[in-house]
Image: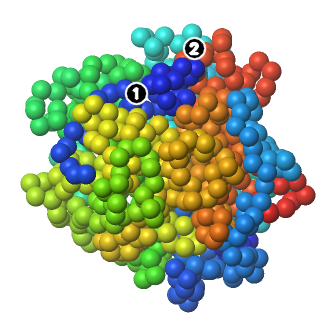
Amino acid sequence: MSLKPLALFVNHDGQSSRSATTCTYKCGNACFHEVPNASAGEYFGDIVARLNRRGLLKGGAAAVLAVGAASALAACGDDTTDGTDASPSGSPGTGTGFTPVAPNTEDAVVVPEGYEQGVIIRWGDPVIEGAPQFDFEAQTAAAAAQQFGYNCDFAGLLPIEGSPDKFLLVVSHEYSTEPMMFRGYNADAPTREQFDIALASHGLSVVEVHGESGTGKLTPAFGKYNRRITATTEFEVRGPAAGSDLLKTKADPTGTKVLGTLNNCSGGVTPWGTVLSGEENFNQYFGNAETVTDADAAKKLKRYGIKGAASDRKWETFDPRFDLAQEPNEVNRFGYVVEVNPWDASSAPVKHTALGRFKHEAATIHVAGDGSVIAYSGDDERFDYMYKFVSAKKVQSGTGASAMRHNMTILDEGTLYVAKLTGDHADEIDGSGKVPAGGFTGKGQWIPLLETGADGKGKSLVDGMSAEDVAVFTRLAGDKVGATKMDRPEDFEANPKSGKVYVALTNNSNRAKDDNPGVDEANPRKLNKNGQVLEIDDDHTGTEFTWSLLLVCGDPAAADTYFSGFDKSKVSPISCPDNLAFDPYGNLWISTDGNALKSNDGLFSVVLDGDNRGETKQFLTVPKGGETCGPIITEQRVLVCVQHPGEADDATPENASSHWPDGGTAQPRPSVAVVWKKESGRIGM
Ligand code: FEO
Ligand code: CA
Ligand code: CA
């Protein structure tokens, strides 16, 4: 194993291609509600060698690092320990030598010539040995709790030590789409069984997958690590909010045990072999916010987009914990970064409150030269913020029980910061996307919000807020310190090769619209429907950074797009950047969500260094109605999660708009796909 960190229909908002069904079930119609942020805020070369000397890259941890997943490692710089890659990153064709896939609306995963593909696992496939085979017409909650969940998003691929080409595939299941899951679904009166199936279809799956000699195919297998985590699995709460009054409920007077995780979007693999997952649009699962009359409590709910009477799924009619009138604090127990140890199927997953509570798209780890751990995380909402957590503890080497115990407490002690950006050419930013001479560039500052000590107790660094307040109502803390309002910060991730950090800013059609905040240099376009990608040169453990825009996305023929100066006649159109990954050569790969250019979503490679910086090529597209998620790029394989294939306003089981992956008249099934090069070649070579 290499030691390298291979590392609708109607555009009802007139812009993104997302269907109204997707908007309702994925994010609770976040883009149609009032913007929750009404605050007045203003606008490593030798690290691997060093870690190796300390033994950090030995054993299983090193193996974990070998797969880029969305985050892992520790390793800036040139890791040539396996002798397979001494090529300069960013050389033309190094890792991006494929013929781009043209924009299309096929009901298929479309890959470049010379590549093959397969499906690894689909919604409903057995994860736990003995689970029933999927039967769309006879679903039960008991079966769903043992089968692969719905709407896969993040994927991590963790090598199993001592078993070549065998991995743990860890996948999150962001949300359920009841009108597509159940024939004759009545949204006004869902059944108890449908509610229970939905709970079981959320969460995460851990499943062993095995390679096949001569191809890149991966096949699921039953093993001792296989596990389903759902919306009813018991979690341990850690950090400053654990045990706080804000987290106490009738069912849990300790405020330390939460049932389940919700809306798990993207995530990251840690160098110590665990998986982080972001609880994103958790607001939508809670009903009867309008019964909360206390002004302060109502203000806090509103800041998190929680309002109105009944929720769309009506879960509050089945379990009082989803009813704010009966249980006002349950909602405070969601919106965290969760950590799962996939190597112990009986371990309780953890909610890390030291990293704050917001709509975490993900959390991804970078290890600084001194062993400090930085967790980067974006708050995916229009006009919300970018955060990082810097640990006080250092990573310990090895995968033994003692190191694992230590490393699983790293995210419990440290400092949480929020980002404030300024532009170098503020006078030149007019909302048109016109590029200032020298590009969109600027400086930034990390403003500390919350310091968590060795005893797990927090210290607030924000006037007028307690530590518990900052941990639970982190958005309000960001408001108070004047953090910069961004265009939906999604994946936020350091390049293992260079240490530079990238943020996908998906879109923000409300930028400079009506009374909403205007443009700034990092968010330079009015009514931004195509998004941009930010590149940060961060002092990882410090408080200063510089930044530039790598891409301003959209149709390359349009004047308001920018590809770092690369010839725009030679790039693929890209819209709504969402998830990020890095290949073994240091190229950035971007998956998209909601393509506003009338093509299916896709996966793109972007060269970061050298003469071809900015070269952007579409590697694959996903079936119609689907979103490309969870990309993993290794030397041998590309994995993507195909989320919500066929999701369209009028799509029902009787009127399916996609039949992927099974074809014929089959119902669409969210699934994980794998792509490999014929003749077992290296990806992109
Ligand atoms: Fe679940 Fe921000 O996408
Ligand atoms: Ca996402
Ligand atoms: Ca998304």
Figure check: 177 above or below 1: above
Amino acid identity at mark 2: Asp
Dot 1 crowding, Cα within 10 Å, few <14, some 14–19, many 20+ = some
**Left or right relative to 337: residue 416:** left
Looking at the image, what colour scheme do you see?
A: rainbow
Let me know if residue 180 appears in the view: yes
Q: Residue at x 69, y 76 (%)?
A: 88
Quarter of the image holding residue 164? bottom right
Q: In the rendering, at what x and y percent does residue 412 appear?
A: 33, 65
Q: In this rendering, is residue 370 above or below 336? A: below
Mark 1: which amino acid?
Answer: Asn
Question: In the rendered image, which residue does mark 2 sit on?
Answer: 650
Is the residue marked 1 within 8 Å of ligand 1, measured from its CB?
no
Toward the viewer: 192 or 487? 487
**Quadrant including the C terminus:** bottom right
Q: Position of residue 10 (x, y in %)?
A: 54, 20
